[in-house]
Amino acid sequence: MQALADKKPSKNISLLAVIGFVLVPALWIGLKQFDLVSDRYLPSPSAVLSACFEVEPSVFWHLAYTAFRLVAGFVAGVITGVLLGIAINKSTVVSRLVNPILNSMRSVPAIAIVPFFLLWFGFSEYGKILLVVTGIAFNIAIATSQVLSEIPEKHRILFKSFGIESSSMMWDYTIPRILETLLPTVRFSLSTAMGVVIASELLGSQIGLGYLMQTARSTFSMHVIFLATILLGLLNALVDFIVTRLWTRSVYWR
């Protein structure tokens, strides 16, 4: 009986997840089926689907370039931010030198620095990836430094009892401590990275979903814009799912 009671909540949650997944598409189909919204504001699902075959080069090439820029910049940005945060926490000199720059730069919206990178790097891939790194690394560095500076009292007592310093245990304590607490910041940074990638493609690129949206806007192709937006949402959801699962598996001791 207890086993059946435990299974019922999980089934309800799965059912709600399925309903939530199909709710928006069902509403979209219903609005177009009864012609309640003009194509100028909301294209039909069939028109959006047909856009997959209208775009040249293929929309999947645009998706692949955007995905590469997002993943490469995001991974490099997370690694850079974590290493910088560890350096700030471990060295007073680094902290005093870098903190003023970090606190000033992280308050500047990442999109605001897109024009500088376009002038410096043009349409190169290195500039777009470096832009993503710059857009997320500073906040991750601040979060990492904050996590390491707030060691729980029970951990301090343990280290003091054995006469060791937490800073001396990079792989045994520092990295696991970061993995336990940094996931929310990393997930938020993923959304920031997506916004920066699209902004860079809107303003200076010749391929990518942002470029596709920009060209579609100039030709009033609303169905292509909807297609690009849907692909962006799916891409962000997929990368977020992979990051969450990998991060959770890496924290195997919890």
Image (spheres, grey):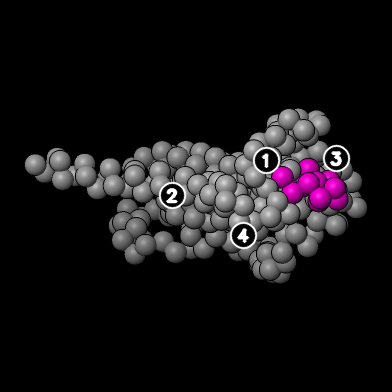
Q: Is residue 190 left or right of residue 165?
A: right
Find numbered disc 2 in the image and state the secondary structure of the residue it sits on.
Answer: helix
Q: Nearer the viewer, residue 60 or 82?
A: 60
Residue 162 image offset from top left, x and y in percent:
32, 53
The residue located at (85%, 47%) in the rendering is: 219
Amino acid type indicated by mark 4: Asn
For the residues labelled 4 and 3, the Cα–Cα distance comes to 29 Å
- Mark closer to the observer (2, 1): 1
Amino acid type indicated by mark 1: Val
For the residues labelled 1 and 3, the Cα–Cα distance comes to 22 Å
- Mark closer to the observer (2, 3): 2
- Mark closer to the observer (1, 3): 1
Q: Is residue 25 left or right of residue 47?
A: left
Q: Which residue is mark 3?
A: 206
Residue 176 lies in the magenta-colored region: no
For the residues labelled 4 and 2, the Cα–Cα distance comes to 32 Å
Q: Which residue is mark 4?
A: 139
The residue located at (90%, 53%) in the rendering is: 119
- 195 over 231 or under it: above or below: below
Q: Earlier in the sequence, mark 4 or mark 2?
A: 2
Q: Which residue is mark 2?
A: 20
Q: How crowded is the residue under tag 1: few (<14 C-alpha within 10 Å), some, or many (20+)? A: many
Determine which of the numbered discs, if any, sits on residue 48 in the image: 1
Give the residues drawn in magenta, as a range.
Answer: 212-223
For the residues labelled 4 and 1, the Cα–Cα distance comes to 37 Å
Residue 202 image offset from top left, x and y in percent:
80, 50
Find numbered disc 4 in the image and state the secondary structure of the residue it sits on.
Answer: helix
